[in-house]
Amino acid sequence: MNLPVGSCAVDTRTGRLGVVMGHEGPYVQLRPFGGGREWDVGPDTVRGATPDERLRAVTGHDGAHGPGELC
């Protein structure tokens, strides 16, 4: 799956939500919402986050991003 940089995605192996930071070879690079260390996910184990998942990420990290910076 080719998700755009800045979009929210879910690592289906772990259930972790992350922001797409880039693509390196076949891998999608995700960073935890709110910051942290990036990790690589194979294209067959990543999917776009649902609106509910994005909302939970925002409310779980209240104030981590300014207005309009929702992934």
Image (cartoon, grey):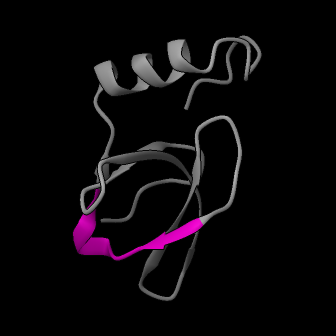
Q: Is residue 14 left or right of residue 19?
A: left
Q: Position of residue 32 (x, y in %)?
A: 58, 47
Q: Which quarter of the rendered picture does the N terminus lie within?
A: bottom left
The picture quadrant where one finds residue 61 is top right
Q: Is residue 20 left or right of residue 64?
A: left
43 within the magenta span: yes
Q: Position of residue 12 (x, y in %)?
A: 24, 57
Residue 50 drawn above or below residue 12: above
27 within the magenta span: no
Query: For the image shown, how many numbered marks are present on the structure?
Result: 0
Q: Is residue 38 left or right of residue 28?
A: right
Q: Is residue 20 left or right of residue 41?
A: right
Residue visible at 32% across and 45% down in the picture: 48
Q: Which quarter of the rendered picture does the C terminus lie within?
A: top right
Residue visible at 70% across and 51% down in the picture: 36
Of 4 and 41, the residue lying toward us: 41
Residue 67 drawn above or below residue 69: above
Residue 25 drawn above or below residue 69: below
The residue lying furthest to the bottom in this view is 25
Q: Position of residue 25 (x, y in %)?
A: 50, 88
Residue visible at 50% across and 53% down in the picture: 4
The picture quadrant where one finds residue 53 is top left
Q: Which residues are magenta?
A: 39-46
